[in-house]
Amino acid sequence: MRLHGAYPLCKKRQIYFPMKRSVSILCLLFLTLAFMGCQSANKPDKIDRFALVTRNNVVLEQPDTLASLSVGNGNFAFTADITGLQTFYKEYEKGVTLGTQSNWGWHTFPNKENYNVMQSATYFDYKGRKVPYLSQDAKSGKDADATNYFRENPQRLQLGVIRLLLKKADGSEVKLADIQQPKQQLNLWEGRISSEFEIEGQPVKVEVFAHQEKDMVSAKISSPLIEKGQLKVEWIFPYAVAENTHSGYDFNSPEKHQSKLEKVGENSAKILRTLDNDHYQVKLDWAGQAELQETEKHHFVLSPKSGNSFEFSCLFAPETNTEKLPTFAETEKENLDSWKTFWETSGVVDFSACTDPRAKELERRFVLSQYLTKIQNAGDYPPQETGLVYNSWYGKPHLEMHWWHTAHFANWGHPEIIARQLEWYHRVFPKALETAKLQGFKGVRWQKMVSLEGDNSPSGIGNYLIWQQPHVIYMAEQLYRSHPSPEILNKYKDLVFATAEFMADFAVPDSTGKVYNLLPPLIPAQEHWKRETTMNPPFELAYWHWGLTIAQQWRNRLNMQPDPLWEDVRTKIAAPNQENGLYLGIAGASDSYTNPKAITDHPMVTGMVGILPMWDKIDPEVMRATLKKVMSNWNWPTTWGWDYPMVAMCATRLNEPEIALEALLKDVQKNTYLKNGHNYQSSRLRIYLPGNGGFLKTISLMCAGWEGCTVENPGFPKDGKWNVKWEGLMKDF
């Protein structure tokens, strides 16, 4: 449903009537009445956003370690168990971990051996020169140690555990099995976690918010156990962990870090944290009489002295001051106002009038994905794949995943989030420029697994990927189309042009000069292909063409002449290779659908038409046959959470809505969406936010379509069962 921009007078004919002063009053009246009639007939009633969002609130009535709930603001998140705090953090370690993480919270182990990152370099011949890549290739001695060091450092920190210290009447500590009558709700409209339960028949209620401007949580706890001295609040601080996928904390090395308590006032204190050369502070303010004590090393207990209700606010920051923190009531009001604004300005889709039984799950997934991507992905930096919950790949962002995390925000009414994160590309621009120069390329070569300072990490795969390069152009173009203006063009032109400069330089002409190829060393988005022999992967070819086309459009908008090399590469880039009416995984791979290894990992061939619009070098019918082959022949358990949205987008653009739904809801483990809305992958990756972002991107495409699409709700069958209503979505490219 088209609910943005100008409305057509006639749905089928798409006729618009610009008003002129010379129109007669009678004619004007006729046209006005006709327009009003069409509006009432074709424009649906405004969606009840509050009802839509709140009917998808998460409600838990028993502990579930895969259903922990989070509050956050995009730069900071706090994840809680069934008690509303992090009481049973050990029990949740193998589920959705109870994290407290921020975008500024990192640790680096001291480089005592003075390692140099170039000790990890592997050299390849390219265009007649030796090109270095930071790699994990087999090395020995100090070179191997250096490679590991720069891959592991820095790593994201768990900033601390905030838990209820609960005691039974006999003085023993409450265990998870002792929790009675639990009922917990995540109120999505308010960003509130409300938890109620009983301990030996005594009620406990906990309400938690995350402040939307500060890296802070506020909690209100009510229980008769407070007065009895059986309920206190404990802060525990860990050391860092240099492991690929980990909860991010080490509680077994108290001697390696420091936690210093500093009283600020009668109801306020600081805890000063030092881990090697890294520092941060924790500020605590509370209401009423209470005492904060260090009970053992890195353990601090806040003991209320009276009453059945208790409130506190806890701020995590690189540095704090003595100013009073917002109270629980102030945080509640700020939080409610912020979330109300978010939901009222976001795109929404209402599936309530659909009769297909699959519709309800689609609605649940998109509402929860909006919430999760807002608190986990909407910060000032590209997110990591497990957000601000626990560490994957040491907590570092992967830039090829940035599209999946972030590109949907523009489609759903929040281009400002993309704008925030593109600022980071400006900051790391010099290091991307340095990488390209070191390798002998023009322009900038964007990093893959990267620190927030822009330092690339050694990888046997990551540094041979190239499909992250055009992402910057894609997101800049989204900003321009959201708000076309000279200001947008001038602000991001350096990013766009330097990226295009690398892309054009990376392509190599053949001996005839009539075709440009993408040559090894190269690993495509379907990562199982060998870097030494991969040539012309289809998605990357399409993305090269699209990215250079957009870059030339930016030159035109700025009244600049087209770049001749960009134009030559754009028009002459190789067409995707096909055999027997199917597009191949890479050029020359005749066994793309018969070799068991070739049908694993990402079915990236579908991304050519899906992530991207149709290209004149792609045959729609060959693409359709390829899509159907992927659906019937792929090894789906080897795929990842964003593959299902990608295939669904391809099907949508090819006018195959039933296939789109089949792909989007495919019954495969890695397409599981937990009670809390997180996309589950495996016991290693219990949450995977690229899946959530991809899902949102796909739903937007299925509803609003793309430029030139005239089909209403193109991703849904026209069988009378899909009365899908939506507001505030932007068409795709």
Image (cartoon, rainbow, N blue to C red):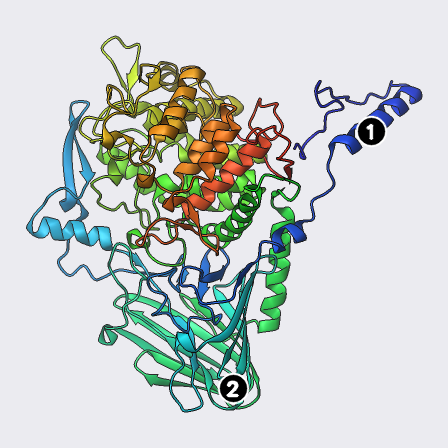
- Residue positioned 22% across, 76% down in the render: 255
**The image quarter in which residue 570 lies:** top left
Q: Secondary structure at mark 1?
A: helix
- Percent position (x, y) of residue 278? 30, 65
Q: Is residue 220 left or right of residue 426?
A: right
Looking at the picture, which amino acid does disc 1 mark?
Gly
Q: Does 376 sit above or below residue 631?
A: below
Category of crowding for the residue at label 2, using alpha-carbon neighbours closer than 10 angstroms: few (below 14), some (14–19), many (at least 20): many
Q: Residue at x 54, y 69 (%)?
A: 183
Question: Badge 1 local density, few (<14 within 10 Å), some, or many (20+)?
Answer: few
Residue farthest toward the right in the current orientation of the protein:
26
- Using the image, tell me which numbered label, if any, was put on residue 37: 1
Name the kind of residue labelled 2 in the image.
Ile
Instruction: Provide residue 514's location: percent of width, then percent of height.
Output: 30, 9
Q: Which mark is residue 226?
A: 2
- Spatial distance from mark 2 to mark 1, Cα to Cα? 63 Å
The answer to whether mark 2 and mark 1 are in CB contact below 8 A is no
- Looking at the image, which residue sits at the far left? 141
